[in-house]
Image (cartoon, rainbow, N blue to C red):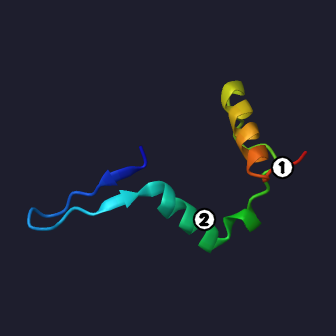
Amino acid sequence: MSVFPLPLQSEDIEPIVDLQFLLHGIYNRARYYLAVNYNKEPVLPLESEHAVWSDTLLRKQGLRNN
């Protein structure tokens, strides 16, 4: 689960952190999509099961087209 309470000091209210939302925001603001060529395989090859999963995900997101 990517949403969790962040424990702070006892008198503080715990904020709820949504990691997926934060990571998407950082990715978009930093414009990583301009620096990463998703049509290439990663430098360190993925295991076949993970390679199929990542290829499918990238195609669904429109980030891989070859």
Q: Is residue 65 left or right of residue 61?
A: right
Amino acid bearing label 2: Tyr
Q: Quadrant of residue 31?
A: bottom right
Q: Quadrant of residue 18?
A: bottom left
Circle number at residue 27:
2
Q: Which residue occupies 18% across, 65% down?
A: 13
Q: Quadrant of the N terminus?
A: top left
Q: Which residue occupies 48% across, 63% down?
A: 22
Q: Which residue occupies 83% across, 49% down?
A: 39
Q: Secondary structure at mark 1?
A: loop
- Above or below, 52 against 29 in this view is above
Residues 18 and 39: in front is 18
In the displayed image of the protein, which residue is found farthest to the right? 66
Circle number at residue 21:
none
Q: Find residue 58 and report its horizontal and vertical position in percent.
A: 74, 46
Q: Find residue 35 and report its horizontal and vertical position in percent.
A: 74, 65
Amino acid bearing label 1: Asn
Task: Tell which circle, 1 or 2, labels the residue nearer the N-terminal end.
Answer: 2
Q: Which residue is mark 1?
A: 39
Q: Is residue 19 left or right of residue 12?
A: right
Q: Is residue 58 left or right of residue 30?
A: right
In the displayed image of the protein, which residue is found farthest to the bottom? 29
Q: Quadrant of the C terminus?
A: top right
In this figure, what is the number of numbered marks?
Answer: 2
Q: Secondary structure at mark 2?
A: helix
